[in-house]
Amino acid sequence: MTDHEPTVLELGLPAPVRSDGLPARVRIHEVGPRDGLQNESVALPVEVKAEFIARLAAAGLRTVEATSFVHPKWVPQLADAEELFPSLAELPGRYPGLRLPVLVPNERGLDRALALGAADIAVFASATETFARRNLNRSVAESLEMFAPVVRRATESGVSVRGYLSMCFGDPWEGPVATAQVVAVGTALLEQGCTELSLGDTIGTGTPGQVEALLAAFGDAGVGPERLAVHFHDTYGQALANTLAALRCGVTVVDSSAGGLGGCPYAKSATGNLATEDLLWMLQGLGIETGVDLAALAGTSHWLAGHMGRPSPSRAVRALVGSG
């Protein structure tokens, strides 16, 4: 006889039920250490960040965006990139297949990343002119010109390049964003040499119909779902619904942030990213493989919340581990 009350996970919940038209496996692109922490008011010590990333890898995540080589003036929370990134060097040996991409804004950022042996980088563009001006201090066309040598040099160095495209569904200054405009900028990034394009709902206004329409438009332009990822914010509670719509369209890469960390420092109406644990609950319930241990990940986010000084915003984390 035991007084132990089994957890929902020990009881086999969520019960996996396959649904037609969905992929068998999804790769989670974990953005918590970079996109999550850059928008948090608390600046964590480099040792905590390194342990966070190690715990994410131990939980089974194999793509963990580690940091950003943006000027510290713009993202002070990630000013320790030169110290943090080398401290992660032994992780790929411990966790085969682990990728640790970093964000670079320009050629100077690329130089810093290459000097430390980064094997995967990302560039960050905007689908709208206003956000491009506010975020990059350039027009959309000028920002694409800035990224061209970055992508070319990275590719020549054997480094893979991911393209982020923000404001794909709505802009806080311009309102609705034309699908054709998103496709034009996105295809330009892919033509430059980006191997993957992440479509961002930066302020969380997108809905499933918009997701389906945008992915169909990319298909009409010759860009299949195998080259696309999705990145949803949960501002209006649509992130999981939008993710499911994307999966039904053939997308198999989903960006999310452990514990629901972060938002967007340049768009005040943007709230947190889709929480990785909430995403995992849905994927496990659909019988979709990810290779990630939900219990271990929830424990990691609960641990990090203690360092952040506040409860995790993830509903799954609160339900599995508690909010204290």
Image (spheres, helix red, strand yellow):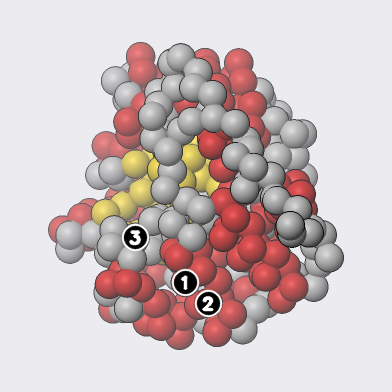
Q: Residue drawn at (38%, 29%), measured in percent from left and top?
A: 24
In front: mark 2 or mark 3? 2
First reached walking from the N terminus: tag 2 or tag 3: 2
First reached walking from the N terminus: tag 3 or tag 1: 1
Q: Quadrant of the N terminus?
A: bottom right
* 78 up-or-down from 216: above or below: below
- The amino acid beneath tag 3 is Arg
* 70 up-or-down from 3: above or below: below
Q: CA distance from mark 1 to mark 2?
A: 5 Å
Q: Quadrant of the C terminus?
A: bottom right
**x and y percent of residue 165 in the render?**
48, 41
**x and y percent of residue 245 in the render?**
55, 22
Left/right of residue 224 with respect to residue 157 in the rendered view: right
Q: Is residue 24 visible?
A: yes
In front: mark 3 or mark 1? 1
Q: CA distance from mark 2 to mark 3?
A: 16 Å
- The amino acid beneath tag 2 is Glu
What residue does disc 2 label?
Answer: 51
Circle 3 sits in a helix, a strand or a loop, which is it?
A: loop
- The amino acid beneath tag 1 is Ala
* 50 up-or-down from 252: above or below: below
Judging depth in this view, the residue of 4 and 141 nearest the camera is: 4
Circle 1 sits in a helix, a strand or a loop, which is it?
A: helix
What residue does disc 1 label?
Answer: 54
Left/right of residue 105 with respect to residue 233 in the rendered view: left
Res. 99 mark: 3
Res. 216 mark: none
Q: Is residue 312 visible?
A: no
Q: Residue drawn at (51%, 53%), measured in percent from left and top?
A: 293
Q: CA distance from mark 3 to mark 1?
A: 12 Å
